Amino acid sequence: MALFHVLSWDEADSSLFAWRHPVDSITMGSQLIVAEGQEAWLLREGRFMGPFAPGRHTLDVRNLPVLQHLVNLAFTGSPFPAAVWFVRKLTAIELQWGTPSPVNVQDPRFGIAAPIRARGTATFRIKDPPRFLVGLVGTTTQFSRDDMAATMRPALLQSVQTAIARTIQAGSSILDLPTKLDAVAATTLQTTNANVAGYGIEVSQVWIESINFPEEDEGIKALRKALADKMQLGMFGANYGTVRGLDVLQTAAGNPGGGAINAGIGLGAGIAAGQALGGVLGASSKACAGCSKPIPQTARFCQHCGAAQP
């Protein structure tokens, strides 16, 4: 007498996303029961047959003629070796991720390297079960949330680093990154989907919760100082190159050695820098009505003597 099976998955372990039924010899006429949110596939000799949607299915060539492509049996009660896989296809899988260590990035505006960190959340689902079962599950009997996290985290981290690099290459400063989370997330989503498409997984959303940098890092300190210097001289119409030139001059002036050669270099640099600074200040400053010291054109009071300006 033929032994008929009732093949189903009760999903007692909620951490599993794919599970292979222990029965590996199926009898024609057996019942395959697929719950809502599941999808079932038969695997025989490396070939998948399906999908079997939610509901009850009788495994019989008279009801499912496609079985004739896998087995040469035409009557109920005949067994054939095959595996039955159940996959949670509709369940969205949420994964939190974060850079395990800071990533060094060079700022395009100032050429200063500084470390950054990023963290966020992503949701994804199994889009192509056969490709997923072949590419990730392999010869195991189940695939869990931890297995999925071990696969997806490296892909997400690689993609977010690529997204940050592209944002920087587009001209954004490292310090601007916290204001560009949406742009970084969009690029991360696109790149991650391209990287995991071969595994039958689709990433539906990526959120970048934060991009931050260790304030105690010397690179971040130097970057903030460079930005502050640029903003300060911008009030006088100067640029960052002028700031660096004046810094060089100040360093040379404070060097007690060097003799006549350094003196000549210092004199030439002083003339050039003086002309540059004079042009900047002359274009955007005026003499105080009280003490005659230079002050910004728009100043209402002198920062030196406090006198009101006409």
Image: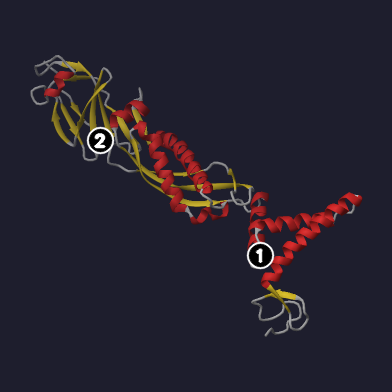
Q: Residues within 10 Å of mark 1 (few under 14, many from 20)?
A: some
Disc marking residue 232 = 1
Asked if residue 37 can be seen in this view, the reply is yes
**Residue at 74% from the left image edge and 74% from the top image edge:** 294
Farthest top residue? 72
The amino acid at mark 1 is Gln
Quarter occupied by the N terminus: top left
Label 2 secondary element = loop
Q: Position of residue 68 (x, y in %)?
A: 14, 19
Of 266 and 138, nearer the camera is 266
**In percent of the image, x 23 and y 31: which residue is there?**
40
Amino acid type of the residue tagged 2 in the rendering: Asp
Residue lying at 71% horizontally and 55% vertically, measured from the top left: 244
300 or 90, which lies in front? 300
Position of residue 70 in the picture relative to residue 212 (left or right): left
Question: Could you say where residue 145 lies in the image, as x and y percent from the top left?
Answer: 38, 37
Q: Position of residue 154 (x, y in %)?
A: 47, 36
Q: Quadrant of residue 305?
A: bottom right
CA separation, marks 1 and 2? Answer: 67 Å
Element type where label 1 sits in the image: helix
Q: In the rendered image, which quarter contains the C terminus?
A: bottom right
Tell me: residue 123, above or below residue 179.
Answer: above
x and y, in percent, of residue 111 in the image? 63, 48
Question: Which numbered marker is on residue 10?
Answer: 2
